Image: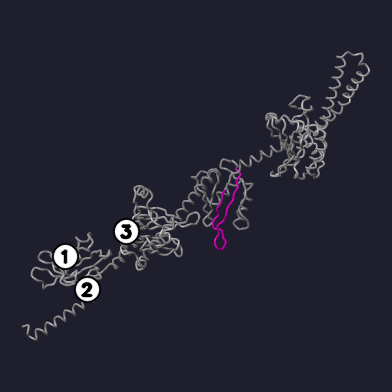
Amino acid sequence: MEDNPNYKISEKVLEASKKRLQGIIDTIPGAPFQYWLNEDDSLSFQFIGRGVEELLEVTQAEVQKDFNRIWKLIVPEDQLLFWESILSSANTLEPWSQEFRIRTTTGKLKMLSGSSTQDPYREGKTLVWNGLLFDITDRKRQETLLQTIYLAESNFSPDTNPQETFARLLDALLELTDSEYGFIGEVKQTSEGKPYLRTHAITNIAWTAELREMFEKMAPNLEFFNLDTLFGRVMTEGKPVVANDPQTDPRRGGLPQGHPPLNAFLGLPFYSGHKLLGMVGIANRPGGYDETLVQFLEPFLASCGTLIETYQSHQKRKQAEEQLNAISNRLMLATDSAKIGIWEWNLTNNDLTWNKQMYDLYGFSEKETLNGYETWRKSLHPSDQIRAEEEVALALQGKKDLDTEFRILWPNGGIRFIKAMATIERAADGSPLRMIGVNLDFTNQRENEENLNKALERSESVLRELERSNQELDAFAYIASHDLKEPLRGIHNYSQFLLEDYGAQLDDEGREKLETLKQLAKRMDGLINTLLRFSSVGRADLALSQVNAGDLVRDARDVLRTAIEEAGTQIEIATDLPDVTCDPVLAGQVVQNLLANAIKYTSREHGRVEAGWNSDMRRPVFHVRDDGIGIREQDYESIFRIFKRLHGQNKYGGGLGAGLTIVKKIVERHGGRIWVESQFGKGSTFYFTLSKDK
């Protein structure tokens, strides 16, 4: 038969047909196949298309030789379903169809779909299937992506915890991209305007107990401020970062010791318009990341942007509502505590609305029904009714704001004083729609003002009477002092005559008594002269003019030159003493008296006295400072009383104790004041002004 030419021709035709068939099979997308379920339950391929090499990344010959070559690539979670589907088809003789995942030899995860029908021309008990394997990875990923986006956006509620949605999105993202870990975060700004990342979902890759504890407390809202990293470049540059060799990538920032390996990284920003809202970061996809995946994830990024923007808008609205509620509560507390009545009058239906304080202000119960404008009008005091209604009418016409005062009558006859202010809401044509305002009860204030006015009138009357009494007292002191001087001169002179004419006839005791009488008369004359000077200060008009304070001090120093030289005192005068409006004669007495006292009470032979001023006050404040004996605090007031001395009559140069009293009166006549600050045993400083506060 082998020598039969026809047989040889048929064999060649058959071989050619097989090659043509194999060529056709190899051009079919996917991988056509025929496999057998043998009597020993083993599977084997009789043939499989060359497309299997692209599908599985193994050679056609390897698969055709050993079915287990495919079996080992199926992910463990799908192996049982795969085998059960074959047995089910074998038992029911129904077509076989199954989707399953494989992990290629290069680590890629693929989703395959297989379908076949049983061949009726089977060999004995061996079952034969003819079918097709094809790659549905892209379609499945697209379906999963769209389903993920749909579920996230439809189930997202910013009122609830948004982290749950972002956690589901991250899980789907890791599965879609076959990545090991990642995060979804929002880009925020520090108070200095620098961006930082706040995560809404993040994979727990903590590698120490301390980090795990921290993650449990803070996750998922972790914050990252170091932008010198791969993910930091996404925020600073605003574009995707693909790093398939992070160890040598110049953009890397380094990893902490113990951090899980980073074999590949993809960081993707998402926007709202031109505003960077956040980013996603994923790591360790087998085979790395590429531009195709970046484009594939664009809908995912858009969804993240929508969710973040919705969340931000909700947070801003929530914060605004909280602030508004807080302001409203504070306003309510303020109006309640201040007893401010708030009202609204709707002019379209004459509806009048009051808050609780308005009812209290008008003496009404909250249960009473308000009859619009008429309720207010009837409450007005008859004497104020016409004027108050005119004020409202002018406000409604837009001629003036409503800001008026009027009296109201309570139902029990009581009278209250009310201040009313309001604003008007108008339609587009300017017609008034409603008036909103406040009422304040200032009855107590009005009563207090009346009482204060009465008190002021009484005070003015008392002041006038006091001024008249002071004038009379000054006149009496002048007259009395003047009239006393004549008999005192007589006593002094007659004592002198007696000593001169009859001194030889008197014993020592008699002469001593006459001398004492002379000294007492002389002292009395000094007291009277002091009273006259004190009285003249109060009676004389001030001859005001502008003089330089430095000239006043230098003139006083010249008058006291002898005392200064005898005491060996150093006088220091400020070079920038200002001009001052005063009575030069009286002001000179003030300076001279204060300098004389400072010289008198210095505690050392070569004391130091300073005359200066303070330019930081509202008016010039002059001072005379010494390093003398000082004054105890309890004596600060008494030293200004007339004829009050803190020491013996003849101690520290003697004196009558009236100098500071006269100084005080001169200062007060100028509208100023004088006071002392001192440290006992270390010195005193007398401050004074010659005008009222500005």
For the magenta stretch, what is the residue range?
416-438
Disc marking residue 50:
2
Image position of 3 with respect to 623: above or below: below
Number of other residues with Cα within 10 Å of mark 3, as a class: few under 14, some 14 to 19, many 20 or more: some
Q: Which residue lies furthest to the right in this view?
A: 501
Residue 331 at what x, y percent from top left?
Answer: 52, 48
Does the magenta segment cover residue 626? Answer: no
Classify mark 2: helix, strand or loop: loop
Q: Residue type at mark 1: give it.
A: Ile
Q: How far apart are marks 1 and 2 (CA)?
A: 23 Å
Disc marking residue 180:
3
Q: Which residue lies furthest to the left in this view?
A: 1
Observer-side mark, 3 or 1, equals 3
The answer to which of marks 2 and 3 sits earlier in the sequence is 2
Residue 639 at what x, y percent from top left?
Answer: 73, 30
Q: Residue type at mark 3: give it.
A: Glu
Which is more toward the observer, 248 or 1?
Answer: 248
